[in-house]
Image (cartoon, grey):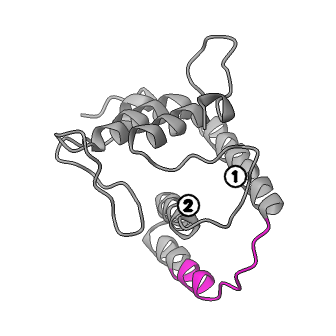
Amino acid sequence: MTDKDTTTSNAAGGPPSPMELVREFHRTYSVPIRSFDDPTLSYDRVGMRMSLIAEEFAELMGAVYGKRARAIIEEATAEAVASDDGERDVIEAADALADLIYVIYGMAIESGMDLDSVLAEVQASNLSKLMPDGSVKLRDDGKVLKGPNFFPPNVARGLGIDEK
């Protein structure tokens, strides 16, 4: 597959889009990239992807509503995964993913958060996960693990907040 299969050009020459940043992560860590002409939910890593989405949503709920809210989401996610009936709807999933991105950016805008700047900090952090020899360490389910040179994202800097 060529980069043309999945690359959206940034004609304005501005900063990379969120999708371009994630694609860079996928290339760096040899994470699969599927051509846009073959959308599917039938691949080995879909469970891991859903787990990551649920994990980040639970983290957001905890940040906004507290630890108990996070625990409730984690419990509900475990129950939902356990009840998987195996049916997949790629169109509904694409709609939901797009809606999630839209409402996430909406919350960031209403909250006065420059999410693109925060995302740049997260990207720098994510790209620091390589092992010193340039290799990639993966969890059993394929999630990229942190190497010894990993550094956490400086979210405060992305928000323009001085942390003391």
The reply to whether residue 5 is visible in this rendering is yes
Where does the magenta region start and end? 75-89
| Type of amino acid at the residue the image marks with label 2 | Ile
- Local packing at callout 2 (Cα closer than 10 Å; few below 14, some 14-19, many 20+) is few
Q: Position of residue 94 (x, y in %)?
A: 76, 54
In magenta segment, residue 82: yes
Residue that carries the numbered disc 2 in the rendered image: 53
Q: Are marks 2 and 1 in contact (CB under 8 Å)?
A: yes
Question: Relative to the observer, which residue lies in front, 72 or 95?
Answer: 95
Q: Residue at x 24, y 34 (%)?
A: 164
Count of labels in the image: 2
Question: Relative to the observer, which residue lies in front, 97 or 44?
Answer: 44
Judging from the image, what secondary structure is the residue with disc 2 in?
Answer: helix
Q: Position of residue 116 (x, y in %)?
A: 55, 30
Q: Quadrant of residue 81?
A: bottom right
Q: Is residue 85 above or below residue 155?
A: below
Judging from the image, what secondary structure is the residue with disc 1 in?
Answer: helix
Question: Relative to the observer, which residue lies in front, 95 or 85?
Answer: 85
| Type of amino acid at the residue the image marks with label 1 | Leu
Q: Position of residue 86 (x, y in %)?
A: 70, 81
